Image (tube, rainbow, N blue to C red):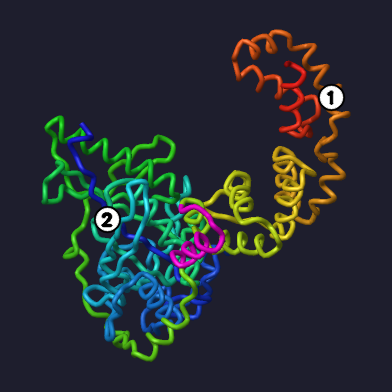
Amino acid sequence: MAKNYETVMGLEVHVELKTNTKIFCNCSTAFGGKPNEHTCPVCLGLPGTIPVLNEKALDRAVTAGLATNCQITRVGRQDRKNYFYPDLAKGFQTSQGDGPICYGGYLDIETTEGKKRIRINRIHIEEDAGKLVHEEGLGSLVDNNRAGVPLVEIVSEADLRSAEEVLAYLHKLRAILTYTGVSDARMNEGSFRCDVNLSIRERGAESFGTRVEMKNLNSFRSIQRAIEFETARQIKVVEEGGELFQETRGFSQDSGRTYSMRTKEDAADYRLMPEPDLMPIVITEEKIRELRDSLPELPDARKDRYIEKYGLGNYDAEQLISSIELATFFEETVKAGADPKAAANLIMTDLFRLTGAEDFQVDMAPADFAKVIEYVDTGRINLGSARKVLEIMFENPDRSPEAIVVEEDLEQINDRALLSPVIDEVLARSVKAVREYQAGKEKALQAIIGQVMGKTRGKANPQLTIDLLKEKIG
C-alpha cells in the first residue's frame, strides 16, 4: 500500500541561541541549576517590567540566516503570541508573526537518491517557555529557568519526502549552527528540538493531505521511528476508509507509537498582535556585512576541501563534517601526521562506536589518536589491538598509547618463529576444519584464524597468520 502514497513533510526546528543571558533580561542561560534559580521579574512576566532585546541573540539569528542562504529583513518587529502556556508565567510568548528576521533560504542535502534542495520558509526569534515537572502527589510544578532563553525557529517548506531526507537536513542544519557558533545544538539538553509536520497523499496528487504535527522528538532515532510509524498509521486509516484530522501527536520511545495530544491550532488561534513594549528591529547593511564577513568555512565548503585535498570519498567526507568537534578532531589528527584515509576509517568505525557520530565528544588528544594509527601502519599493533587501545584511551585519556601498548602487552606478533608453533598446535586440534577448507570451504579457514587469534590474545599478525596457515595446510 505504501507504494501508492507519498509522504510530505515540513520541519519546525527550535534552536537555543548561544548567549550568556536571556533574550529580554540579564538572567543566565546556563543549562541546569536549581529550579527557578535563573529568573527575575522580567522573565517571570511580573507587572510593570519592560523587556529589552538581547543584541547578541539578534546577531546569532541573522548569522543563522546568512549561513542558510536566507534573505534578511531590514526592519522587523516582535509580536505577542496569545496562546496559553502554563510554563510561561506572563501567559503569552513574545515571537514574530509577519516580519521574521530571515526568509527565503535553502539547504542542499545529499541522500542515496542524490542531491536535493530543501527550501527554508523563515527563521524568526522568540523566547523559550519554562519546563513543567510532574510530581506524583504534588501535581505539576514549573521550573522557569528556561523561560526567556533566546530561540530561533527555523521553518522549512514541505519539501521533505522520507525519513532519510529529514535526517540529512537536520544533520546539515545542526552542523551549520555549530560551525557558526549560533548554538551548541545539543539535543540531550534541549537546545536543538524538532517538530515534524507530516501528511500523506496519493502519488501524483498535487494537493496536500491532512497535516499532523509530531512533537517531543528528542533524538534523531526517535524522529526516524516517529516518521515511519506515523506514515504507516495514516495510510492504514485512509485505506480502511477512516478520516484523518489535524492534530498534535506525541511519540512514545517505549512503544514506538505516536499518540494524540490535542487538536492542532491554526495561526488565527494565536491572536498575534504587535509587542508594544519592544521597539522595531532595524538591521543595517553594515551589520549584515559584518556578520557575513565573520562566517567561518561552512560544512559544504569543508567537505569539498576534504575530497580535493585528502582524497576522501563523498560519504566519508559527509560524515566527518557533521559536527565542528568531529571535523576539528579529524584535521588535528592529520596535522599530527596521520594518513587522512586511515584516520577517517578509524574514526568512523571505532570512535563512532564509542561516542557516536551525532554527539561526538572525546577527550583523547588528536596526537595520541594519530600515534595509534602509526602503530597500525608500522605493524606494531593490529587493528584488534588498536581497538583495545582506543577503548582504554577513551575512558582514560591521560594514558598514552605507548604506555597502554606496553602495559597491556598488545604488541603484534610478527615473528614467524614465534607464531609457527602456535599455528601447529591449533591445526592439530582442528582436523575437521582443515579438511573442510581443503574441500573448498573458505569459512573453515576463518574459524582456524579465530582460534589462532584467541590463542595469542588477538596479537597475531593477521596476514602472517593466513600465510603460515596456507603453507602448513598445503
Q: What residue lies at 40% left-to-right and 80% top-to-bottom? A: 58
Amino acid type at image mark 2: Gly
Dividing the image into 4 quarters, which one contains the C terminus?
Answer: top right
Q: What residue lies at 48% left-to-right and 68% top-to-bottom? A: 183
Examine the image and state in which quarter residue 71 appears.
bottom left
* Residue 10 numbered tag: 2
Describe residue 9's horizontal placement relative to residue 35 as left or right.
left
Amino acid type at image mark 1: Ser
Examine the image and state in which quarter residue 172 appears.
bottom left
Describe residue 459's horizontal placement relative to residue 258 as left or right.
right
Q: Is residue 99 above or below residue 107?
A: below
**Magenta stretch in the rendered image:** 299-314
Q: Residues within 10 Å of mark 2 (few under 14, many from 20)?
A: many
Between the residue at mark 2 and the residue at mark 1, the CA separation in whole angstroms equals 63 Å
Q: Is residue 462 magenta?
A: no
Percent coordinates x, y for residue 407 in the rendering: 87, 44
* Residue at image mark 1: 420
Percent coordinates x, y for residue 304 in the rendering: 46, 63
